[in-house]
Image (cartoon, grey):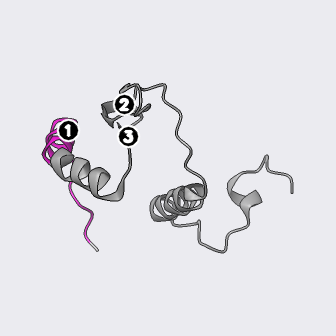
Amino acid sequence: MTPKTAMKPGDIINRLGDALPLIRQICDISGVPGASIGVFHEDQKIYTTHIGHRDVAAKLPPTSDTMYGIGSLTKGFVAASLAQLIGKHPGVTWTSPIQDILSEYQP
């Protein structure tokens, strides 16, 4: 597999901007009242935007401080994070003991 050329922050921002109408449509169709999107690239925040409302009745928009109840979505975030870790570190596999990755972890 050939590594892809890294995208520049400006390209990422443009693509996300182009995707906003679709993201808004998905929120409308699914009934999601509000959402916040943040993107980090090489340890720097390069993009944030907020869609819809954090309080529908008061028509208050979400902010960077809005807290969302994401419930069991955390499992998906953890799995995606592990997949990225495995992709970047050849010595780490899906069956690597957690202590090999995080030496400070004590079960």
Q: Residues within 10 Å of mark 1 (few under 14, many from 20)?
A: some
**Disc 3 residue type (three-letter):** Gly
Q: CA distance from mark 3 to mark 1?
A: 20 Å
Q: Is residue 100 magenta?
A: no
Q: Are marks 3 and 1 in contact (CB under 8 Å)?
A: no
Nearest to the observer: residue 16 or residue 8: 16
Q: Residues within 10 Å of mark 3 (few under 14, many from 20)?
A: many
Q: Residues within 10 Å of mark 2 (few under 14, many from 20)?
A: few
Q: CA distance from mark 1 to mark 2?
A: 11 Å
Q: Are marks 1 and 2 in contact (CB under 8 Å)?
A: no
Q: Secondary structure at mark 1?
A: helix
Residue 62 x, y percent position in the rendering: 39, 29
Is residue 101 among the parts visible in the rendering? yes
Disc 3 designates what residue?
Answer: 34
In this picture, which residue range is highlighted in magenta? 2-18
Name the residue located 24 percent from the left edge and 47 percent from the top edge: 24
Disc 1 designates what residue?
Answer: 13
Q: Which mark is residue 45?
A: 2
Name the residue located 20 percent from the left edge and 55 percent from the top edge: 5
Nearest to the observer: residue 83 or residue 5: 83
Which mark is first along the chain, 2 or 1?
A: 1
Q: Quadrant of the C terminus?
A: bottom right
Image position of 47 with respect to 71: above or below = above
Q: Residue furthest right?
A: 107
**Disc 1 residue type (three-letter):** Ile
Q: Are marks 3 and 2 in contact (CB under 8 Å)?
A: no
Residue 56 x, y percent position in the rendering: 40, 34
Q: Which mark is residue 56?
A: none
Horizontal side, residue 26 vs residue 88: left or right: left
Instruction: Between label 3 and label 2, give the one nearer the viewer.
Output: 3
